[in-house]
Amino acid sequence: MLVRMILGIVITVVGLALALRRTVWLNRLIKSGQPLEGRTENLRERVGTHLAEVFGQRKLLKWSVPGLAHFFTFWGFVILATVYLEAYGALFDEHFSIWWVGHWGVLGFLQDFIAVAVLVSLIVFTVIRIRQDPHRKERKSRFFGSHLGGAWLILFMIFNVVWTMFLFRGASSAAGTFPYSSGAWVSIGIGHLLSSVDHGTLVVVENVGLLLHIGVMLVFLNIVLNSKHLHIFLAPVNVTVKRLPDALGPLLPMESGGKPIDFEEADEDAIFGRGKIEDFTWKGMLDFATCTECGRCQSQCPAWNTGKPLSPKMVIMDLRDHLFGQAPYLIGGKDPADRPELPLVGPASEGGVIDPDVLWSCTTCGACVEQCPVDIEHVDHIVDMRRHQVLIESAFPTELGTLFRNLENKGNPWGQNNSERLDWAKDLDFEVPVCDGNLDDAVEYLFWIGCAGAFDDNARKTVRATAELLHIAGVTFAVLGDGETCTGDPARRSGNEFLFQMLAQETKETLNAVFEGREPGTRKIVTTCPHCLNTLGREYPQLEGHYEVVHHTQLLNRLVRERKLVPIAPVAGTTVNGVGPVTGRPLTYHDPCYLGRHNKIYDPPRELVEATGATLTEMPRHADRSLCCGAGGARMWMEEKIGKRINLERVDEAIATEAGTIVTGCPFCKVMLSDGLVQRQSENQAADVTIRDVAQVLLESTTRGTAAPAAAPASQPG
Amino acid sequence: MARLNGFGCFYCALPVRFTGDHRHPGYVVIDHVAPAIPAVDLGGLPDLRVLHRFCCHTARTGGTGTCSSIMLRRAWLGWATGEFEAGRHDKHYGIRHYPRLGLHPARLREPQLFRKYWRIRKMQCAALACRYYTGFGVLHSDATSEVT
């Protein structure tokens, strides 16, 4: 008894001392990041998030099988803490039991049940890892690029925790020192198996089992603190201090030293984006240390899935490895003067940590953020690195130079003259009111056309359809005409925060003049562009521009519900939304990333499609797992030279549903999908498939009973 | 609309000043912008443009072809305006000096960072110009005024 107590105390002191040393080091490293405010506010909401995501495993359970396995493993760690309490108590008193509940059979049952559940989960994890073996599946495996040896070691250590627990408890049960007389079915069962062993041997087995159980935990603790499995301790913290409600939608303002940068007052030594690893905030560093390399982000990334070098997981892993490598220069240990000059973004041949092709492949679709079970903010980090490349290094894809010039000089990405902004309305049979100054009191909505709606032929059809529907429903609206300029979204996503600020300031002042005198709640904007929706509604508040912005599908859906728009169901022999016979093919809906994942608008467009009487069929990747069209993150304006084109991947998925029409709710998605479809049609595929906006589908359905428009030729999308 | 008030400079698209000191870099000038613009338009009328006094100088010496970035043009104007407001004579911010926006590599703490400091200065000066001349932001070149 005395020997096991002394041995137990010695190994605990050594194990905890090593763990404490590593913990202090990690704490200093993460705190060396730039300051970041606002991550401990809204405590109530944060506690709720913590409970849902840590104890409820909400995000992990999105993937049912591995989610359930992780659920039981997590709760195993929580419940088996009571076993460790009993183990440490037994070091000092062999008859130790937890106060009040220590003899309660329910607790004993729970301990044994969860331990068995953990064992089953380990088998599940093993099967998943074998089936997803990256040596065999290569890029198709979500574990491609992850540290595989470390993962197997962790599974082995968890197995050791469980079997040593049963050895110690079984021997204890047989020796008569076990606190539970019922409930702990496995431990008591093992005790029965050992009942024929003499008492002296049982005591030795119990001592060995106890010390092994404690020793395994201490070794495990130190392995965790020195491996990717840091997430066991850091994930609960990372989840609690995440952006609320999530790191999607608006981008964060560019900050230096914890304060938003005022470009006019910017210090020359201010931090513009992230050009060095120490430029990241403590939250960024916490993100890097928390990544568990599960690869869920990678499995959803449109760039990775089309053969591009970007994997969100590997971006975070590379930044973490670089951070840990540079740590001695950041928090002491090595002379900073000896620090090698390595570019954070640069080709590997120059010692770069993140390859430029990786950085510029991101579409900012947010699939990685949506899936990440530990709430890593991949998109923020990628855009922050882009900011430094654009603003300080002036290193960006050449195509972006044209984009920036067009935005600067013409106020739109196309470089068109603003005088053409109203061309879409030329052939309408009613007059579109143009707001020149203050919005008339009788006008309910400002209809924000957006650059795509104004200049792209395909998007103009959407805007026209929406305007017609609003007119039919009697909604009063006005447009800004040539008073509109780009909201700045493409500039911001491509890292040109300065240009975004300039464009946004102008637009904000224009809108403030338009809505002057209007109370909050009456400053209503409707737009057909999810990027404008996101920027006007969720990013302009950062500049004190507050408006109520709705997507046209939301407004139209409300009008349909209020019976102000009445879709007429098709009759047999007629067409459904201009394509095919009624008995023919369904429609499939493509979720725009900035409408769906970024702003959680999934249902209104679907309800509208169904309201027309058409049959909706879903693509395998839809709603929050929808595949990007490839246009986000200013990728619309860049060449796509590596791998398969993302829009082709998406069009192929849509064609495979055998839908006759692909509907969407974003002008950029429409352009990308149309380009992809045209290519496939040139290869003699999907000849009778068309691409349309939800508003076009609804308009045809609504006007079917009055003046039926001619069905669009099948070979002409849009 | 608020942003359309006043005349915008043909070169940088920011509003020009009609009042105050005529030596101010932002004071209005109506002139031909040679050589990019012919002196007369197709109708035979003089093709005159509204410009800032400073922009007129830079457009004449550099020409519109040498700098297609409106932000850089604004940065130059912003720097000149800042220098004027600080009471410096225009020989200190004139045509010989503006491309560097007042930065001299030899006088920098870390001369090798000249490019970085210049880019930051460019953003500072452009932001200053936008705020100074519009009170908030920017105008775009096709919103500028033409005098014929």
Image (tube, rainbow, N blue to C red):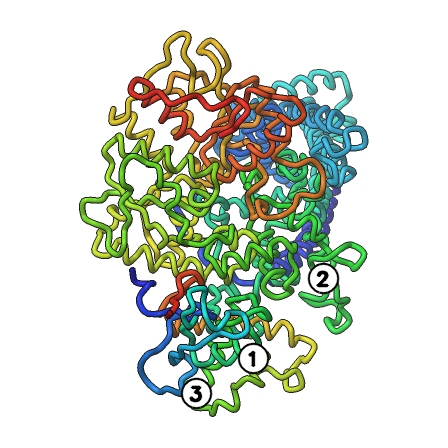
Place residue A65 in its image quadrant: top right
Residue position for label 2 = A343
Considering only order in the chain, which callout, 1 or 3, is on the residue closer to the N terminus? 1
Q: Position of residue B117 (x, y in %)?
A: 60, 75
Q: Label 3 belongs to which residue?
A: B86
Nearest the eye: A432 or A511? A432
Q: State how far apart marks 3 and 2 are (Cα).
A: 39 Å
Residue at 55% x, 58% y is A404
User: Does mark 1 fall on the same chain as mark 2?
Assistant: no
SS of the residue under disc 2: loop
* Nearer-the-camera pick, A182 or A76: A76
**Depth order, front residue of A237/A444:** A444
Along the line of sight, which residue is nearer the eye, A457 or A234? A457
The residue carrying mark 1 is B61
Rendered position, A474 above or below B120: above
Q: Secondary structure at mark 1?
A: helix
Who's the residue at 60% across and 32% down the image? A676
